[in-house]
Amino acid sequence: MTLKTSGKISEGTMKKLILTALIIFLCGNIFSQQTQKNQTQITVKKAWVRPAAKNSNSAIYFIIENKGPKEDILLSVVSEVAELVEVHETYKKGNDLMGMREVNLLHVPAKSTLEFKPGSYHVMLINLLKDLTTGLSVNATLNFKNAGKIPFRAVIGDSQEM
Amino acid sequence: MRKRVFLLFASILLISCKEKLPVVEDFGGVHYSLVNQKNENVGFPDFVKGKLVVINYIFTNCPDICPLGTNNLRLIQERLKKEKINNVEFVSLSFDPEFDTPEVLAKFAGIRSLDLRNWTFLTGDKSVTDAVIKKAGVLAVVGDSTVFKDGRKIFYYIHTDRIQLIDADARIRKNYKGSEINIDEIINDIKNLG
Ligand SMILES: [Cu+2]
């Protein structure tokens, strides 16, 4: 009987302990996420994406701003609107020839901005899984070496003014 | 007498103005059998003869430079509408006809809500589109490509970034940079040729 009671008490205490631990863990987790966010000095601004039909390709443009004291490296970009997502660069060849190539590990220096713009860097959306219709938007996430995941939304239109 | 001299002078000025764009290349004596975005057979440049033509050369898998040039055609078309200039046709010719079927071109135009009343997208046999771009002085060679997991492959062309102005006799009169064209410049040239 006594044993049983003490067993019950310890079971209750156990539950409280677990609950407390859980709260502490969750709070700690939120706190650490907040500090992580505060440490992230990378922002994405003025994001837009070209209208394009399903099964074709498109490009996302934006400005990356690195306010931090350290350079960061763009490792990859993720978006669910296309089969493949790559960082590309349009380049000039000779007088008026234009080509396009994939870019790996794009460096964003400390206290600088890097613009993805027509005729230059773009996030290439290859084989769109749906129509990108003007006025709607697309979600994507930049994945940085230090800053981690930076999600953003790009408006579909023919320029950033849209 | 003074009036006559003035008229002579004015007409010389006008003629020299109109002739100031040299002939870059002549499509006049040639005929290419192509297909438009509605899958109709089209003879180029016959179907636009008698009109000025603003043409660009594209492949729809191009996400950056070709949409820029195409958007510039749209801006030129809008300016001409505003200025009530009606004698101009627009043409976008694909140099990647194996991928750019009429259906693909129709979708490319449709998703951008382009006004196709005086704008035609052209595709056809690769040998024919190759002949057109060669005559136009446009280069398009396969550069990079993307291979999907299932083995499908799409090609990206290294190509001339170009818009051209063709006169009513199917002669190319000027080359412009497709992605960076000065809209005022081509509008002026159109007025000069019109
Ligand atoms: Cu690209």
Image: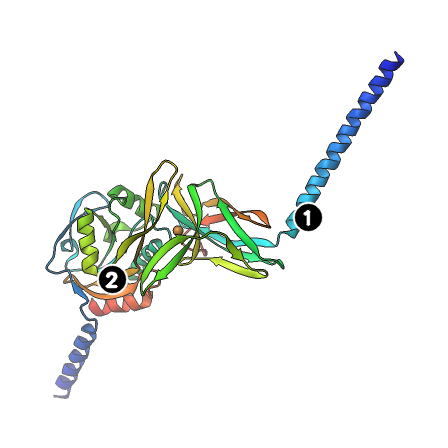
- Ligand 1 within 8 Å of disc 2? The answer is no
Instruction: Identify the residue at the far left of this view.
Output: B29
Regarding residue B9, the answer to whether it shows in the image is: yes
Name the subunit of mark 2: B
1 and 2 marks in contact (CB < 8 Å): no
User: Which residue lies at the image location 54% right of the left edge and 60% below the top edge?
Assistant: A113
Instruction: Identify the residue at the far top of this view.
Output: A1
Say above or below: B168 vs B34: below
Name the subunit of mark 1: A
SS class of the residue under badge 1? helix
Label disc, if present, on residue A35 of the rendered structure: 1
Say left or right for A94 vs A36. left
For label 2, the residue is B164
Give x and y (percent) for residue B70: 32, 55
Both marks 1 and 2 on one chain: no
Q: Amino acid under label 1? A: Thr
Q: Quadrant of residue B21?
A: bottom left
User: Which residue lies at the image location 14% right of the left edge and 86% below the top edge?
Assistant: B5
Q: Which of B74 and B137 is in front in this view?
A: B137
User: Quadrant where the C terminus of chain A lies?
Assistant: bottom left
Say above or below: B140 vs A138: below
Give x and y (percent) for residue A96: 31, 63
SS class of the residue under badge 2? strand
Say left or right for B62 vs A46. left
Q: Amino acid under label 2? A: Gln
- Alpha carbon separation for disc pair 1 and 2: 56 Å
Give x and y (percent) for residue B34: 17, 48
